[in-house]
Amino acid sequence: MTVRADRLAEQLGFVLEVDRLKSVLRRGYVADGSRYENTAEHSWTLALMAIVLAEHAAEPVDVSTVVRMVVIHDLVEVDVGDTYVYDDAARAAVAEAEARAADRLFGLLPASQGAELRALWDEFEHGDSAEARFARSLDRFAGFLLNHASEGRSWRENGITTDRVHDRNAMIESGAPPLWDEVRRRLDDARARGWIDPPPAPAPGPG
Amino acid sequence: MTVRADRLAEQLGFVLEVDRLKSVLRRGYVADGSRYENTAEHSWTLALMAIVLAEHAAEPVDVSTVVRMVVIHDLVEVDVGDTYVYDDAARAAVAEAEARAADRLFGLLPASQGAELRALWDEFEHGDSAEARFARSLDRFAGFLLNHASEGRSWRENGITTDRVHDRNAMIESGAPPLWDEVRRRLDDARARGWIDPPPAPAPGPG
């Protein structure tokens, strides 16, 4: 086998392995509320957002790096599944498993290519670059935007309050201030419409 | 409203409108054969392939352009739906409707941004750049690869023969010769396994 054919075999093995991201369901709905979103679709939305919303980044960013970063940012969910953004305990517990998944998945690629994409994944997870901050802001913002578009269904199903949405998304401000303004506007709107913080159900009567 | 807020409102309108791509089903299956693939997921796969397989392009390509191109290449399906790659009549009929859909969808964006992405879409559709040729090769290759991975289920359901797969995918050679070699290898494999060109069912007995 030639080196090129060898590399291609590894690369296609990787592509087919991470195709399973299409079966990883997130806790939020697609915009029309018809079903849960999967992680492959979510990653496409982030790539589109990186292209369309780059001007709202807090600092100038290399859009091409942001797009590559968001395309691969959730690959580890092939092994680990999606961790709900509002589940603090699960989020703390999953970091090590995600690192192992990154070892395995990026390890399917030719070594130097795998190392390069692994470094990009690490940058998304932990990096302090303008690109990583913007990408993480988009990740949070995309979830919020679809929850608002689907009339808060996921918030109500999971008992998520305005305060928690505010706290969990406040980091958007550091990566993309105008998107954080938009979150606050839409969160006010959601509350006004009763899509979040619904009044408690009346107590059962005495009968 | 500030100019920036105005632009953001248009951009988010666009992002939410094209979210409907998640509900456009293609005629092929995801790799594990569990269900049809949708166009948003397909677009993510192409972005990932552009990143991972760029070295196999016939000529050097600007990977960043290819990735942006494939992220938006199928947006028109929001209005027009997916056109099966093996349905020649439908493919000929749909071009005008796709152009109208492109007018409408890219027209949701701020003017200069919409024009830029529309030009990128036109380049994918008709362009003779190395990037467009590679992107179109990936588009065809991705469909083939998943049809092979899902054991030819879509080929058999639609009565697609080896000859048609060969003819429809031969254009891959001009954009990415090693991927075309891979198609031929996997097509031989599919035939050997009976995933395509199945023998005709035996004629019913005389009873």
Image: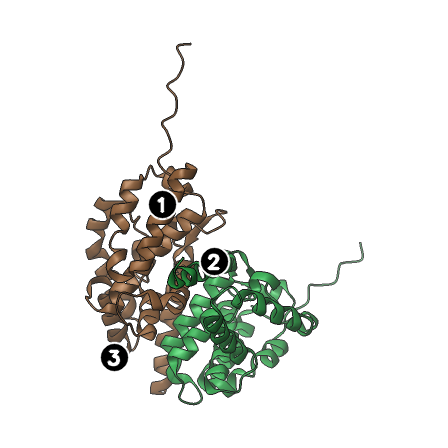
Chain colours: A green, B brown
**Which residue sits at x=59%, y=62%?**
A79
Q: Residue at x 74, y 63 (%)?
A: A203
Quarter placement of the C terminus of chain B: top left
On the question of residue B68 being in view, the answer is yes
Q: Is residue A68 shown left or right of residue B125?
A: right
For the residues beneath circles 1 and 3, the answer to whether they share a chain is: yes
Q: Mark 1 belongs to which amino acid?
A: Leu
User: Are the residues under marks 2 and 1 on the same chain?
Assistant: no
On the image, the x and y values in percent for residue B34 come to: 50, 47
Distance from the alpha carbon under mark 2 to that under mark 1: 17 Å
Amino acid under disc 3: Ser
**What residue did someone put label 1 on?**
B187
The label number, if any, that marks residue B112 in the structure image = 3
| Position in image of residue A112 (x %, y %) | 47, 73
Is label 2 in a helix, a strand or a loop?
Answer: helix
Along the line of sight, which residue is nearer the eye, B64 or B57? Answer: B57
Q: Chain of mark 3?
A: B
The circle drawn on residue A13 is: 2
Q: Are marks 1 and 3 in contact (CB under 8 Å)?
A: no
Residue A188: in sight, yes or no? no
The image quarter in which residue B7 lies: bottom left
Q: How busy is the neighbourhood of tag 3: few (under 14 within 10 Å), some, or many (20 plus)? A: few
Question: What's the CA distance linking mark 1 and mark 3?
Answer: 44 Å
